[in-house]
Amino acid sequence: MTINHKGISVGTSIVLSAIILVVGGLIYLSGRERSSPSSSTAAAGDTADHHGLASSGPTSNLQNLINQAAPDFSLTDHNGVTYSLASLKGKNVVLFFNEGVMCYPACWNQVALFGADDRFKGDDVVALSVVVDSQQEWNEAVRQLPELAQATVVHDNGAKVSSAYGVLTTKSSMHYGQLPGHTYVVIDQNGIIRHVYDDPNMAIHNDQLVEEIAKLS
């Protein structure tokens, strides 16, 4: 059988061109998959950013705050009411430093349960949930979970108070140095810190806090 040399060259050229196109297409698609994850993968990544990152530096030793005078603060809620350390003298104060709007549902649940618990609404006890979010951002959270409106949430602009209390670099902080995680500080009626607790598990601690406050009587 005689094979035309020219025919072989043309056929080979066509085959090679087809192979090059297929391989090139596969490489292109592979690159797209690596650089542009699917929406479900991206969503999982967002969640990890908020709740799955360990602190990236040394953590605060909050126990050093015990029996020390509480750092001064002046924080305002969404109604324009300002709470300061001086104005709260004579009350036992619970400060709940938390990640705020993006910490759903853990922080939202704790904030809402403070608002629903009469044990934190007496003449001698007040619970302040401290968030770095703006009032507008927190209003959106309240729109989604109206129970949040019953709690006293105060806005720590620039995270200045959170920084003063050392709660930006705790084990619970998912945004090291920028946002608190899930940290409780109990201040007695004389402005002295008597109890601190940082919870990376972000659980509800109403009962434990009531027990700690009872020790101050």
Image (cartoon, rainbow, N blue to C red):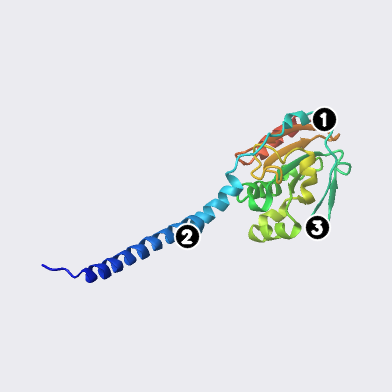
- The percent coordinates of residue 19 (x first, y second) are 33, 63
Residue furthest toward the left?
1
The tag earlier along the polypeptide, 2 or 1, is: 2
The tag earlier along the polypeptide, 3 or 2, is: 2
The residue sitting at 46% across, 57% down in the picture is: 31
- The percent coordinates of residue 14 (x first, y second) are 30, 69
According to the picture, the residue beneath numbered tag 2 turns out to be 32
- The reply to whether dot 3 and dot 2 touch (C-beta < 8 Å) is no
Which image quarter holds the N terminus? bottom left
- The reply to whether dot 2 and dot 1 touch (C-beta < 8 Å) is no
According to the picture, the residue beneath numbered tag 3 turns out to be 79
The tag earlier along the polypeptide, 3 or 1, is: 1
The residue sitting at 66% across, 47% down in the picture is: 113
Badge 3 amino acid = Asn
Badge 1 amino acid = Gln
What whole-number distance in Å separates the C-alpha atoms at marks 2 and 1? Answer: 56 Å
The answer to whether any part of residue 63 appears in the image is yes
As displayed, is residue 86 above or below residue 112?
above
- From the image, state whether disc 3 or disc 1 is nearer to you: 1
The residue sitting at 68% across, 54% down in the picture is: 148
**In the image shown, does 103 or 217 lie closer to the viewer?**
103
Badge 2 amino acid = Arg
On the picture, is 48 further left or further right than 75?
left
Q: Which mark is residue 68?
A: 1
- The percent coordinates of residue 34 (x first, y second) are 48, 55
**In the image shown, does 94 or 74 lie closer to the viewer?**
74
